[in-house]
Amino acid sequence: MTETMLLPPKKRGVFSPVLIELTIVILFFALSTSVIVRLIAAAGTTARLSEYEARVMLAMQTVAEQVKADPVGDDDCNPCGARVFSVGISPDLTVDCVVTSDISPLKGTIYDIELTVISPEGKVYALDVARYLPDAEAAP
């Protein structure tokens, strides 16, 4: 016997259709996984932003109610006649407040309260509130 008879016959280098199909499936799953990971990361960012915005709105509403209860405050006004102060809620959340008064022709005073918060990313949130207080002589 010769040596060539003992070796199995050589096949030509042909890819099996099963290998091609498995390669395509693996590439599809890799692409799908990368898209899903990006979606999860975007959802996490959106959730953190939404949580911060909810805290901002609650803080501004709380400060607005406190200022509306006593719009005159300590009556420490700047030269323009506006009372300006800041309320620190947390290290990343400070509410800036400007209270201006306008004497109404209806024998009272209108207090305009402007609240603003600047986020660490630079986004500005604003809330305007007004309160009318009648003069003491106009009260019954």
Image (cartoon, rainbow, N blue to C red):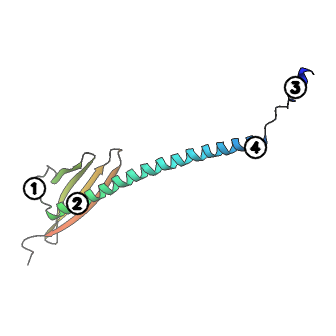
Tag in front: 4 or 2 = 4
Which element type, helix, strand or loop, lies under badge 2?
helix
Tag in front: 3 or 4 = 3
Which element type, helix, strand or loop, lies under badge 1?
loop
Q: Earlier in the sequence, mark 4 or mark 2?
A: 4
Tag in front: 1 or 3 = 3
Coordinates of residue 117 in the picture (x, y in percent):
28, 51
Residue beneath disc 3? 6
Q: Please name the residue shown 10% across and 52% down the image.
A: 76
Q: Earlier in the sequence, mark 3 or mark 2?
A: 3
In space, the residues marked 1 and 3 are separated at their CA atoms by 107 Å
Q: Which mark is residue 18?
A: 4
In space, the residues marked 3 and 2 are separated at their CA atoms by 91 Å
Which element type, helix, strand or loop, lies under badge 3?
helix
How many residues crowd mark 2 within 10 Å: few (<14), some (14–19), many (20+)? few
Residue beneath disc 1? 75
Residue closest to the eye, 7 or 92:
7
Q: Which mark is residue 62?
A: 2
Could you tell me if the residues under marks 1 and 3 are in contact, i.e. CB atoms within 8 Å?
no
Residue closest to the eye, 75 or 13:
13
- Residue 58's image quarter? bottom left
